[in-house]
Image: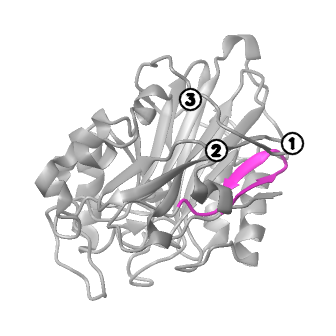
Amino acid sequence: MVLGLAAVAAGALYVRTLGDSPTTGPRRAVSTAHPPATPAAPTPASSQSARGASPAPSPSPTHRGKLLIHGAGDTNFDPSYIPNLQTYGWAYALSGLDGLFQRDDLTVANFECAVSNLGTAVPKTFNFRCDPDALPALKAGGIEVGNLANNHSYDYGPDAVVDSRRNLEQAGIAPVGAGKDTDEAIEPAFFEIKGWKIAVVGIDEVVDPYPEAVATDDHAGTACGHDVGCMVSAIRAAASKADLVVVDINWGVELDTQPRSYQVEQAHQFIAAGADVIFGGHSHRLQPLSVYKGKPIFWSLGNFVWPALSVEGSTTAVAEVVVKPDGTMTARLIPAYIASSGHPVLRAAK
């Protein structure tokens, strides 16, 4: 089942109780402030089997609280690409969200850039170097996870990849999807929140330059590349250590407004391996929300902190997933619009 985008662009809030029929209309955001999510140390896995094939016993739902999770699309804080961030300050990037990310339990954003001052530009059309000085403002705005699994994390080479991780960690934002080698690139970020252990995995299927930007055993880069087996194994390993697995993946084709058939096939494989939520990106266009076996798939969250280049590119949304104590979920796209470059603003419900 797929939710269309016309009403999202117009400002309607779409809410899906997974497994039920879609409903329309505004839905109040959680208003109670929660303590910021704190990364948890990985726990050794006792089994590498897929959770879908061999589920591990779960803690009693009475020991779990309700979770509110958000996903944001392509986030860029390169001051040369978005001068507004220099003019108005780094907090301008999230100032149009009315504290949405500060009120939730976990926010994952796709950092579409090298978050580093190191390295040299690799030959390509666009190279994005985001200023590490922006990270404290993004953290204060409520972002807990920075996904580096995308086609711009390697824009300034391997040294910048390693430094990007270091800069995010120092700012209190958990990096995923890239690292000094394969193991670090596929390593999840773990969080313990309200009785849940949550894993966030970053995957980069759109690699630029290819294959140079893919992490290997002795080379820094992004996670997995075109290796679907690597993706499935990373998700399976995360699922063996966590109650809930969130996947942030860079995939698809630029300017597409619907997923390709191979993406649908891959998403089904990911869910079979243990993925509970999939946040997608790369097309620079907002795509629909789908549900497969009760799991939400946000095919592409489009642009987020990005230049206002066109109506289509500025029309965006925030992904929201609510996980109830019994594990059932609701999912929606919260409409937003890039009102001026680097400044997404939530749209009022109609």
What's under tag 3, amino acid-wise?
Answer: Ala
Is disc 1 in contact with disc 2, using a CB cutoff of under 8 Å? no
Q: Name the one closer to the observer, 325 or 201.
A: 325
| Residue 191 on the magenta segment | no
Q: Which residues are magenta?
A: 288-301
Which marked residue is nearer to the observer: mark 3 or mark 2?
Answer: 2
Using the rendered image of the protein, determine whether residue 25 is visible from the camera's viewpoint: yes
Which marked residue is nearer to the observer: mark 1 or mark 3?
Answer: 3
How many neighbours does mark 3 have within 10 angstroms: few (below 14), some (14-19), or many (20 or more)?
few
Q: Position of residue 166 (x, y in %)?
A: 25, 49
The vertical placement of 340 against 43, above or below, is below
Tell me the number on the disc at residue 29: 3
- The residue that disc 1 covers is 19
Using the rendered image of the protein, determine whether residue 298 is visible from the camera's viewpoint: no
How many neighbours does mark 1 have within 10 angstroms: few (below 14), some (14-19), or many (20 or more)?
some
Which marked residue is nearer to the observer: mark 1 or mark 2?
Answer: 2
The vertical placement of 273 against 44, above or below, is below
Describe the element under mark 1 as helix, strand or loop.
Answer: loop
Q: Quadrant of residue 245?
A: top right
| Residue 293 on the magenta segment | yes
- The residue that disc 2 covers is 13
Is disc 1 in contact with disc 3, using a CB cutoff of under 8 Å? no
What's under tag 1, amino acid-wise?
Answer: Gly
Disc 1 or 3, which lies upstream in sequence?
1
Q: Quadrant of residue 307?
A: bottom left
Q: Position of residue 176 (x, y in %)?
A: 44, 52
How many neighbours does mark 2 have within 10 angstroms: few (below 14), some (14-19), or many (20 or more)?
many
Give the Cα separation between the discs numbered 1 and 2.
18 Å
Give the Cα separation between the discs numbered 3 and 2.
11 Å
Q: Position of residue 192 (x, y in %)?
A: 52, 25
The vertical placement of 103 against 347, above or below, is above
Q: On the rendered image, what quadrant is the C terminus found in?
A: top right
